[in-house]
Image (cartoon, rainbow, N blue to C red):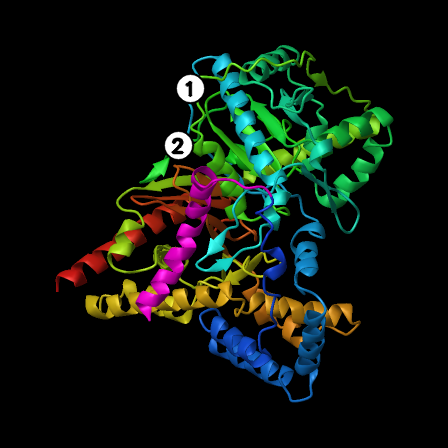
Amino acid sequence: MLLSGRRFIENKIKMTNIIMKNLTKVSYHPKVMMAKENSLPHLPVPPLHQTMNKYIIALEPLLNKNQLEKTKKIVSEFLTPGGLGEELQHKLEEKAKVTDNWLAEWWNNCAYFEYRAPVIINSSPGVFFPKQDFKSDFDQYRYTAKLIRAIIDFKGLVDSESIPVDYSREDPLTMMQYKKLLSVCRIPLPVRDAEVITPPEYSRHMVVAHNNQFFKLDVYDDNGNPLSEDYLADQLFHIVSMSNKKDECSVGVLTTQDRNTWAQTWKRLISDPINKENVDCIVKSICLICLDQPVPVVATQYKYEFPNLIGQMIHGGGSHENSMNRWFDKICQFIVNRNGMVGLCYEHSGAEGPPVMALCNHILDMNINTSSVSESTVSNKKSIPQKFRWNLNSDIIDRIELAKDHVDQMTGDLETRVFHFDLFGKDLPKRYKLSPDAFFQVSLQLAYFRLHNYHPPTYETASIRKFAKGRTETIRSATPAAARYARAMDNNSINATVKHELFLKAIKAHVQYTNEALNFQAIDRHMLGLKMTALTSGMSLPELFRDTSYKYAMHFRLSTSQVPTSHEAGLGFGPVVPDGYGVCYNPMETKFIYVVSAYNSHPNTNAGDLGESIARAMEDNYMLLSTQAKL
């Protein structure tokens, strides 16, 4: 069973890397990318009793005995024959009969478009690329020009639907998210946001931000061909020369506000026709290119910690750094800092990590740098970039000042740490026929328990792209088996053999839960469907969802995701609760790169401490495996 599960998870881990290799090694053929969409299975509705039984098991490590017994009674009442649970299940099954994905609209609205907190930190992740060595300003322009060409190349593959279909084992995956990466923008509206997807023929430009000012940069010539790197670098030089002083009243900072506030400001902003033309240009652009000002690199304090600017990719560092040099509603913002830190910030409503990393790896696989030779294409485009001019009244200016204060508070509160754990990588668990993902997640449970002495509600992202319009399900990594292992690991009265057995059982439990989540047999999205069915049917919210145990189980103190890539790159995001952590990791062959975040304002969380505890837990598990292997 363990070997079979290991192979399943290893396939999950390798899937993104296989996607990346396809982008560079497979011959492209138009109209293949969406070829499997109509044949993907519809999203199923799991059996009601199965979900409720798994729900109780998932609560075991999180609750005390009295709390668990109370919730068991509530679940038993919910499952009464002919009762509320069966009624909601029947309604959900009927909905599933008439749609290919009964969850998609609910999930998009609940997780993204009706989410009223700012997208910055709370929703949008950042990705860092390998650091560049810019010896001059022109090196930054040259690199950015090559980056632009790589983005255009990827966009051409998406527009022509030439990217091969992604597979997980023999199962084709939905490719819809690839169409949500470029030429897409979120629009702030009261109650529920919207998105605008601009057709290729109307999205022929990028918007460049420099010193908090915005410019329209055409990236195709008059014949529809991509402009040359030389031409683009020259245009970037002109942009910088036209914006040599920071604009301290930049409208970009308005996109950092909560969605209701930003929606009100948006309406006022675009009431002016010139402002509306500027905003439309941003909305219709392929992406943003952010030429950032250099900032100091965060000093390292912990073992395995790596100097980083992941905060610049997530939020820009505040109004005094680069947060005003952004438009956070744009799905993709590529960031090129003068100090050589590069990467992107992406608005999460469009896609999950794997398609985003497919785009990133396409760029990184092209090995763009400042020394590679440029092509000698001569452009017939002679226009200069268009600088945006804004008409800002006193009301908008006041709102900009409030937004600056707010973004400074938010960015100052987020602690981020990047770790390069290079004692071993996924090669070690593979040597012992274990899942690298499970190895990291079980180690994370131990790391958290050592710091906090309890087991946290934990969220790990699982892809359900094997189903039509599929996005994600939750892997609840705090399994009973992981809890038993974590409690035993530092207990001196338990011998190493028993600890080893508990560790393997925890690995096996995580593999099993992952398998169930990937096949949409976990619990979280099904329970959301039952809850939404009640709400949309005009029914009162069932006690099951008013129960304090359910609310606590949804309070994910550990929000985690595995985003693998063969490059020394990584992804980071903020915690989803005030007293929580965000943990994202890249399991490379000989190292684990992981990013940990926490809020400075909470007295009980510290990103550096958790990052160091994760490293220690992996070291201890390595010793546990190697010692037992010698017996």
Q: Is residue 487 visible?
A: no
The percent coordinates of residue 309 (x first, y second) are 47, 32
The percent coordinates of residue 69 (x first, y second) are 52, 81
Q: Residue at x 59, y 58 (%)?
A: 470
Q: Is residue 488 left or right of residue 224?
A: left
Instruction: State the extent of the magenta-drawn residues as a range.
Output: 1-30
* Number of callouts: 2
Q: Which residue in the protein does label 1 denote?
A: 372
Q: Amino acid at mark 2?
A: Pro
Q: Is residue 299 left or right of residue 466?
A: left
Q: Residue at x 53, y 29 (%)?
A: 150
Q: Which mark is residue 2?
A: none
Q: Is residue 448 magenta?
A: no
Q: Nearer the viewer, mark 1 or mark 2?
A: 1
Q: Which residue in the protein does label 2 denote?
A: 307
Q: Is residue 186 above or below residue 528?
A: above
Q: Residue at x 61, y 70 (%)?
A: 527
Q: Secondary structure at mark 2?
A: loop
